[in-house]
Image (cartoon, grey):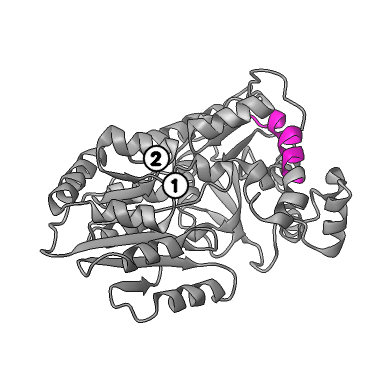
Amino acid sequence: MVDGAPRRRILCISFSDITADARVLRQLDVLAELGDVTTIGYGERPAAAAEHLAIDPSLPSLPQTPAGVLLLAARRFDRVEFEGPAVQAALGLLAGRRFDVVVANEARAMALAHRVADGAPVLADLHEWAPEERAHVASWRLLVRPFMFHQCAKYLPLMSAVTVVNGSIGELYRERFGVRCRVVRNAGPRRDLEPQPLVEGRIRLVHSGGAIPGRNLEALVEAVRGLGSGYSLDLYLVPSRDGGRYLGKLRELIGGDPRITLHDPVRPHELASTLNAYDVGVFSLPPLTPNHRLMLPNKIFDFVQARLAVVFNSAPETDRLITGHGFGAIAPDHTAAAMRDTLAALTPEQVAGYKQAAHRAAEVLNSTEDAAATRAAVAELLGDGAQPVSRSEPPSSV
């Protein structure tokens, strides 16, 4: 940016509570280097934003009204794409505003971003594989999946840049829609921490994430209940929007087991130091969707920055990191039995060695590279002559 030149105006759209969305918060830190950022989404103003336009959190981003559902069922996708209540609210809040670049987080924000950009370049941070995000849910699979394929086929060619969480998911977009994607992982910043010594006679397990059905938290609980008294499990869970029903079921499953403790969630910037008190970060996810099968979740990077050993169920992207850096063990599948047996086979000496390996890996498995990828992409779009994303081949039919 030339000294004395006006600051560029950047719009960041995310249909999430941005202050609790670690990926978007990291994105905002980079955007704020390059211009004045207006955010639009649920919740309070993020610290890096110059301005925040708040959407009522009760408004869904998908067209879940009766009229919207009928249009989805009738495959009237061009009519329904702006029918989501949160999208309609956003259109009202953004009316008459102009921006130099627009960032759309997740595919459901692309139509809105393209409309409000009014010719300005748009970066689509798709995060994961949008067309089958919740394909394991029957209603989503029947109504929303075709809509999301349509949105990707319609809007991805209009995006000036596209980013995704890993190369495997980027390859899916290339194969199906013919677009090349840059990789921006879910890695957090490097934290200046040291591995904590083990407590004699105890291996302290920990998990952090959303309290959402389908995340297989029951398997973690059942695995620990099948282990001896030398194991404990602490869960730092973000409640889902179900009024606490799922958390209540989880409490019932835990019962009075004194080795398993539920905690309130902590802020993203506090997570690594909180997890640092434990020994092994655990995670297990059934491969119900392509995103599950090709997962590279933020929690593996959180665990590394916390200097923990990890035990994950097998998946190509996480297997590559765990074996490449030697900071953990891999359960052969997502079942409670596989997690239990993998944990039972660990020795204190192995766990200590894995924690030291995580300490070494923390120097490279952090957000520095990812921030550089976002910075380069947005800086290019803020320059003159930004062009739509390059196509590698014609898109396949959807």
* Image height of 166 relative to 188, above or below: above
Residue in view at x 61 percent, y 26 percent: 174
Residue type at tag 1? Pro
Q: Residue at x 63, y 52 (%)?
A: 136
Q: Position of residue 73 (x, y in %)?
A: 85, 52
Q: Residue sitting at 71 percent across and 37 percent down? A: 152
Q: Secondary structure at mark 1?
A: loop
Instruction: Decide: few, some or many residues near mark 1? Use Cα within 10 Å; few <14, some 14-19, many ≥20.
Output: many
How far apart are labels 1 and 2 at the CA level? 8 Å
Magenta span = 147-160
Q: Nearer the viewer, residue 23 or 205?
A: 205
> Residue lying farthest top?
393
Q: Is residue 2 left or right of residue 147?
A: left
Residue 72 percent location from the top left of the image: 83, 51
Tell whether position 152 is magenta: yes
Q: Is residue 151 magenta?
A: yes
Secondary structure state at the residue bearing disc 2:
helix
Q: Which residue is mark 1?
A: 297
- Position of 376 with respect to 331 (left or right) is right
Going by the numbered disc 2, the residue's amino acid type is Thr
What's the magenta bit mostly, secondary-structure-wise?
Answer: helix
Q: In terms of image quadrants, where is residue 151?
A: top right
Q: Are marks 1 and 2 in contact (CB under 8 Å)?
A: yes
Q: Residue at x 13, y 63 (%)?
A: 199
Answer with mark 1 or mark 2, whichever residue precedes in sequence.
Answer: 1
On screen, residue 12 versus residue 71, left or right, reads: left
Q: Position of residue 319 (x, y in %)?
A: 37, 38
Q: Which residue is mark 2?
A: 318
